[in-house]
Image: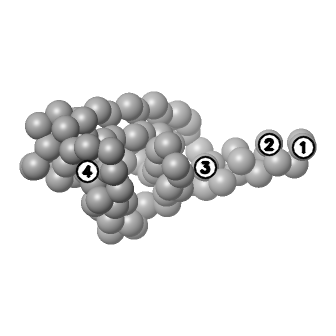
Amino acid sequence: MSVILDFSMYPLDKGESLSPFVARSIKIIRESGLPYEFRSMGTSIEGEWEEVLGVVQRCFEAMRADCSRVVLSLKADYRKGPSGRMKRKVQSVEEKL
């Protein structure tokens, strides 16, 4: 696995409570089988570049199906090496605390 991708996606045209739309994306992410961490302001996914972007694409397609304006923020950390970096990065910082 070579990328940790952190993203948030939400519609601007659906009012204040957006949890049904976020839940739709989380379901897609869970079904992908990739390691992920869901947080209050975004989600991180770990995997190969193409498969991670494919998951984001599926989330976008599901959202734009009934939303006329969608905001997507995305950042990625690519690094060659073994999988499990998402958890190791957090553990490394926690050890130093």
Q: Earlier in the sequence, mark 3 or mark 1?
A: 3
Q: Quadrant of the C terminus?
A: top right
Q: Nearer the viewer, residue 63 or 12?
A: 12
Q: Are marks 1 and 2 in contact (CB under 8 Å)?
A: yes
Dot 3, how many residues are within 10 Å of its Cα: few (below 14), some (14-19), or many (20+)? some
Q: Up-down: is 30 above or below 75?
A: below
Q: What kind of residue is marked 1?
A: Leu
In this rendering, would 65 be left or right of 72? left
Q: Which residue is mark 2?
A: 93
Q: What kind of residue is marked 2?
A: Val
Q: Residue 2 location, x and y as percent?
A: 49, 43
Mark 1 element type: loop
How far, Cα to Cα, is label 2 from label 3? 12 Å
How far, Cα to Cα, is label 1 from label 2? 7 Å
Name the mark on residue 86: 3
Name the mark on residue 97: 1
How far, Cα to Cα, is label 4 from label 3? 21 Å
Mark 3 element type: helix
In this rendering, would 57 be left or right of 36? left
Residue drawn at x 17%, y 33% as measured from the top left: 69
Q: What kind of residue is marked 4?
A: Cys
Q: Which colour style is shown?
A: one colour
Mark 4 element type: helix
